[in-house]
Amino acid sequence: MSALGKHDPEVAAIIAAEHVRQTETLEIIASENYASAAVLEATGSILTNKYAEGYPGKRYYAGNVHADEIESLAIERAKELFKAEHANVQPTSGAEANMAAYLAFADPGDTLLGLELSQGGHLTHGSPVNFSGRLYNFVPYSVDRETEVVDMKTVATLAAETKPRIIVTGATAYPRQFDFESFAEIAHENGALLMVDMSHFAGLVAGGAHPSPVPYADVVTSTTHKTLRGPRGALALTRETNGAALDKAVFPGTQGGPHMHSIAAKAVAFGEAATPIFQAYAAKTVENAATLAEALQSGGLRLVSGGTDTHLILIDCSTLGISGMKAQNALQGAGIIANKNTIPYDERSPFVTSGLRIGTPALTSRGMGITEMRQLAAWIVHVLKDPDGEGVRESVRKEVAEFARTYPVPGITNA
Ligand code: DSN
């Protein structure tokens, strides 16, 4: 029996039940993934015991020889992986990485541009209920009503009119690639910096399956646990000239003691992401999303922007006469885990929504491919066309559980 099982059977039992849930369901939340056994081991390591405020070679506490080694290794691996001049691996979440980037390169009250939350942007890209929207004058840009893709002419006009300090791009529910080169041109012509939050597609960038924002952006932030398949956490990249400002904004600007166990796990994940196996994973994730999108469209579903270039698909449930919430709940009853999401110009509230966001990172980590994506699409279409049918949900749930059990979950049933 494990130490946890002996010491605290109540917590151990809940985690064991979560093992079963992760094994028997199909995880298609676009931002979720499975960390490897090595990443989990580093995350659960004794590095959690150490306080290490500061940076390698310049700490505020004694005893940091190994903290310095691990953080330096993580920094070097991040720089090498993303071909960046400077990396900070201390942000504990994407929100904190973004907070540090704003603190480093703007002042409270400054104007910034960000993609509207209801159109796929993130809370920290200027939502009025978030620190970003409260401290900064965020002006949102939108997608075109017809194409549902960001219209660079509108961004250019808005930038010329508002002269922002930073233009923020990147999203949580946008199925297309951003045009980093045009964003950089617009930003620089208007005296702004370009910030790219690549949280969703960082793993695709690392694996060469998506253009990199690093050559164009002045600052790049990312979580480490989505397509990148690392521990829950984040990082920020910038040019050498901006490195000191960014570091100061992370510590002491927005954070105290870094989470050294997570930093060790980030180093492991960056090492994994630099391998040919990961390159194949990234390519497969995108290929699976394209296959899934095509199969869903053949099944009669409407996809926002007509498809995907990434790991992510946004389904317009309103054409089926149901809300995103109803779709999410019906699929959950069938063992398929997705999340409701607003779609551009949504008429429903952000809690109910008209959309369903899905993605292929987690299932691709389980070794699934084109055949499995076609089967998944058939189940999704079947359930969404009869969202009140208990019989349909129950029969799909049994088929899904049996099917899912045959695909190992990294970190649980294999390495
Ligand atoms: N929760 C993340 C996502 O699902 O995209 C964003 O913070």
Image (cartoon, rainbow, N blue to C red):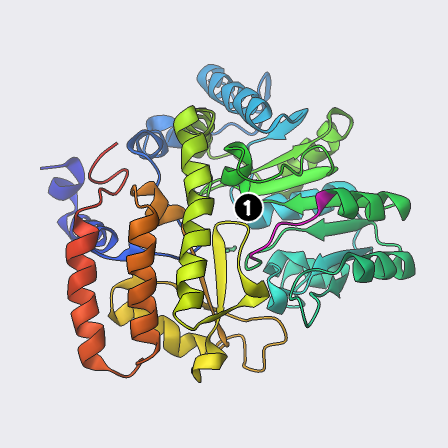
Tag 1 secondary structure = loop
Q: Does the magenta stretch include residue 353?
A: no
Q: Which amino acid does label 1 sit on?
A: Ser
User: Can residue 11 be seen?
Assistant: no
In front here: 85 or 258? 85
Compared to 259, does 72 lie above or below? above
Indicate the quadrant where residue 134 lies.
bottom right
Highlighted magenta segment, given as a residue range: 175-180
Q: What residue lies at 71% left-to-right and 66% top-to-bottom?
A: 142
Which image quarter holds the C terminus?
top left
Which image quarter holds the N terminus?
top left
Q: Where is residue 307 in the image (x, y as percent from the top left)?
A: 53, 60
Q: Is the magenta stretch mostly helix, strand or loop?
A: loop
Q: Where is residue 328 in the image (x, y as percent from the top left)?
A: 37, 71
Q: What residue lies at 71% left-to-right and 44% top-to-bottom?
A: 180
Q: Position of residue 116 (x, y in %)?
A: 67, 65
Q: Does the residue labelled 1 lie within 8 Å of ligand 1?
A: yes
User: Can residue 271 be seen?
Assistant: yes
Q: What residue lies at 48% left-to-right and 80% top-to-bottom?
A: 319
Q: Name the residue under label 1.
A: 199
Residue 257 vs residue 38: left or right? right
In front here: 302 or 216? 302
Q: Count neighbours of disc 1 (C-alpha within 10 A) and say few if under 14, some if 14 to 19, many if 20 or more.
A: many
Count of residue discs: 1
Compared to 31, does 339 lie above or below? below
Residue 391 vs residue 270: left or right? left
Q: Residue furthest front?
A: 298
Q: Which residue lies furthest to the left in this view?
A: 1
Indicate the quadrant where residue 91 lies.
top right
Residue 188 vs residue 262: left or right? right
Q: Where is residue 31 in the image (x, y as percent from the top left)?
A: 45, 52
Compared to 224, does 240 lie above or below? above
